[in-house]
Image (cartoon, rainbow, N blue to C red):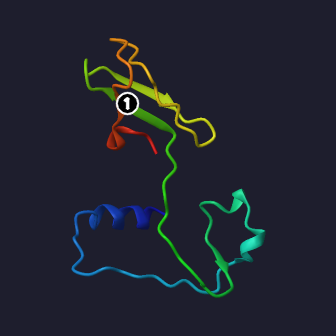
Amino acid sequence: KQWYQRRVREFSDVVLQHQIQVRPFNAEKTANMRTLNPTDIDQLITISGMVIRSSNIIPEMTEAFFLCYVCQKTHTVEIDRGRIAEPAVCPNCETRHSMSIVHNRCVF
């Protein structure tokens, strides 16, 4: 372990010219897609099968960030079961329908 920590410190500022790809084999855990559990998160496992379709991962929003166009007051709303409770009235200036979501300030 000490050897590894020394090497990490020694090569921490090295910039690679190309991307490194790793293809592990003979992993200890093998599972089917249907038998995966939350305990398998952050574990290296192998899955046997054929890829039929793939798509991008869509992050799930946990907290929405709103900005009032009238008074510039901000307001955050926690997401409940995937539903965003968009404020109809600004809590500061009480203007109706003036709140707009700011996507890059939301928490995912």
Q: Residue at position x 64%, y 88% from top?
A: 50
Q: Considering only vertical position in the picture, is 93 above or below 5?
A: above
- Residue at position x 63%, y 60% in the image: 41
Image: 59 above or below 29: above
x and y, in percent, of residue 87 in the image: 46, 25
Label 1: which secondary element: strand
Could you say which is closer to the camera, residue 53 or residue 9?
Answer: 53
Q: Residue 13: name its quadrant.
A: bottom left
Q: Badge 1, how many Cα within 10 Å: few under 14, some, many 20+?
A: many
Give the residue type at disc 1.
Phe
* Residue sitting at the far right: 35
- Does residue 75 lie above or below 5 as drawn? above
Where 75 sits versus 45, above or below?
A: above
Residue in the image at 52% along x and 36% along y: 84
* Residue 15 horizontal/vertical position (percent): 22, 71
Q: In x, y percent, where is residue 19?
A: 31, 79
Pick the residue in front: 91 or 58: 91
In the current view of this chain or complex, which residue is farthest to the front? Answer: 96
**Figure label count:** 1
Query: Label 1 belongs to which residue?
Result: 66
State the residue at coordinates (69%, 78%).
Answer: 28
Q: Position of residue 57 (x, y in %)?
A: 49, 63
